[in-house]
Image (spheres, rainbow, N blue to C red):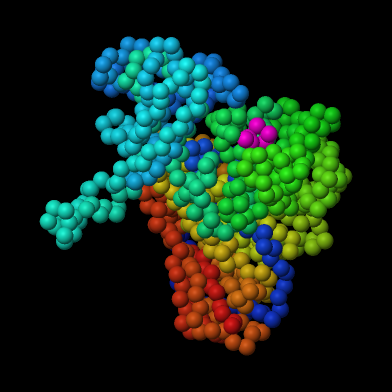
Amino acid sequence: MRKTHVFALAILILAAAASQISTAQQPVTLTVRADQPGVKIDPMFYGIMTEEINFSYDGGLYAELIRNRTFRDNAQNPVNWSVAKYNDGEGSIALEDNPVPNTALTKALKLDATTLKTGQRVGVANEGYWGIPVRPATPYRVSFYAKAGSDFKGRLMVAIESNDGKTVHGKANVGPITSEWKKYTATFTTAAPPCRKPTPVVGGPRGGDGPCLDEGYYGSVTNRFVISTESPGTVWFSMVSLFPPTYKNRPNGNRVDLMELLAGMKPSFLRFPGGNYLEGPNYENRFNWKETIGPIEQRPTHRGPWGYRSSDGMGLLEFLQWAEDLNAEPILGVYAGLHIDNGARILTGDALKPHVQDALDEIEYITGSTSTTWGARRAKDGHPQPFKLRYVEIGNEDWLNMATASYDGRFTMFYDAIKAKYPNLQIISTMRSQDIARNYQHTRKPDLLDDHFYVNIPTALRQAHLYDNYDRNATKIFVGEWATNNPRVGDTPMMAFALGDAAWLTGLERNADVAIMNCYAPLLVNVNPGGRQWAVNLIGYDALRSFASPAYYVQKMFSNNRGDVVLPAKLDPLPMLTPEQIPVAPQPPPAPGAVARGGRGPAPVTGMFDGIYVSATRETSSGDVILKLVNIQAAPQPLRIDIQGVPSIRKDATGEMITGELGAVNTVSERMSVIPQRISIKDSGVKFSHELPAHSVSVVRLKTR
């Protein structure tokens, strides 16, 4: 994605305009022909897309807690590190070029503690990604490289402690430290939760004052990680790592709560590694997959395109295991010679040939048997079994550089090489359907095009019909990035954006024969100050807590109830709304001291809009008829539902519904402000009535068996 992607069309006015339609809504009949199954919905239809933006990996999904663990984030200063002093102990830290043999580690942090006296302590402290999260009774794993100067004879202590050093949450001793570089490891477990609200329990150890049962204690983030010593001398450190428990206990794994949220969406695929992250800000900082495999100390790190350095802890194998842990297939993006430097350097011809080979090697790493060179390397890295791979995308958003006219030649080189060795792989072009409509020509016809949309609410509503008239014989579509996100304010989507998303998704489902896969973007955002580079993201978090947005819940509701085939569905009469009646995203207040500027502003919104959006599908395994219903009106909408072509529908139906104020959002402190509610219908049948709340998204399952 790029900051230039927003399609600005809407007039942005305050919600709940006085001109909204009357609350006395006319009933609407929804007719569904369950005996006339239409296009099939690919099992891959719903997935997720990821890239390193908003501290999505480092400081996010990747569970590493140490920031700047290899001391390469700043060439002059040990950013995110400081001196920890105890009992008036003195010391200093400095960066040095001091490589660890047989690794990619070139920088070291020197601790000078030569003036320590008896009873004093000094150490190096890391602040983490906006704090070190501490959860009670939780094990932590520490590893680091160290070597001692000739004047150092002691041991080290590793600990997580409060920022003022007064509370130690967990600690372990390490050593003695040798004069040669060596890797050290330790584990410790944090204490049980503090007894803030003791609950009396009869028979407790103090005659009725029982154990602390403070279930509300979640943890803290105002902490630091420290490696300290009581012994005078000099010690050097490199690759300092601290891990909490990870999802499925993977050694270099992912944060549990975020993975649980992603697993809840039941995604069928993971598109990786990006996004701009694939291309990098320049050639030297592209996603070079061969430098992201193997032990973490063999990964040199690189500068990402969003203003901070990537640790490369989330490497190729970690991406694949992430997909595996979600029971999802990988959709692989391969570097194709373009960077985020405004076309300053684009590799073509002979200069691109080594990278075509890199792509073939990457595919072999993913899919090859252990008898192949790169399949054997994958096995050495800990995963002997090949991964399933069906889709490969060549580059990212090359339509933004059409002026160079280089993509067709680059695409052709990759297409020919990949198809020659892997004829069954589906090749995705980063050109969009609208580029083809404007007469862009491929020398080799791609298997899929990649459409990207970042839009406002009116555009999202209109685009519910975008593919209705798409040529069914034309190239199929992968909607590889999309979101209702304009105006782009806030960390995560408000309820108004979720309505736009839901309306758009009904259109994608109805046209699943041409738009065969889709994924929202961006996926993740660290909500701490300075953590966000792109506003409006699906899931938010700080170091300790995470939350899902209303748009996430829409995604989850739809993905968990996707169905296998589309059923014809008709609304009669279809309510129509004027531009003044559709939901709008409340404008943020102007910044203090902001000066109003002249200009034409956004183009006026014209025409009429559907008041209700619907997708009807059927799940073959259960026989369920699934209704997805989006009411964008400001009043409840009575529905008469007529399911034709089935002998009966059971009386008990279930589902979910989400609604809320248009500007409502979830946050780390108010994580459950806007969440789905369960629907229980006791009088369903082939014909029954149901009411859709105002500004709501509903998913209803009807039992035919």
Q: Which residues are magenta?
A: 289-294
What is the count of numbered marks?
Answer: 0
Determine if residue 679 is in view: yes
Is 43 displayed left or right of 349 in the figure? Answer: left
Above or below for 187 versus 200: above
Q: Image quarter for residue 339? A: top right
Q: Is residue 291 magenta?
A: yes
Picture coordinates of residue 177, whole percent (x, y): 43, 21
Where does the N terminus fall, quadrant-wise?
Answer: top right
Q: Residue at x 55, y 74 (%)?
A: 701
Nearer to the camera, 357 or 466: 357
Where does the C terminus fall, quadrant-wise?
Answer: bottom right
Nearer to the camera, 664 or 151: 151
Q: Residue at x 46, y 19 (%)?
A: 178
Q: Residue at x 47, y 79 (%)?
A: 681
Above or below for 93 versus 677: above
Is 80 displayed left or right of 448 in the figure? Answer: left
Q: Is residue 572 magenta?
A: no
Q: Residue at x 53, y 78 (%)?
A: 639
* Residue located farthest toward the left when viewing the structure as drawn: 207
Above or below for 483 versus 644: above
Is 430 displayed left or right of 350 in the figure? Answer: left
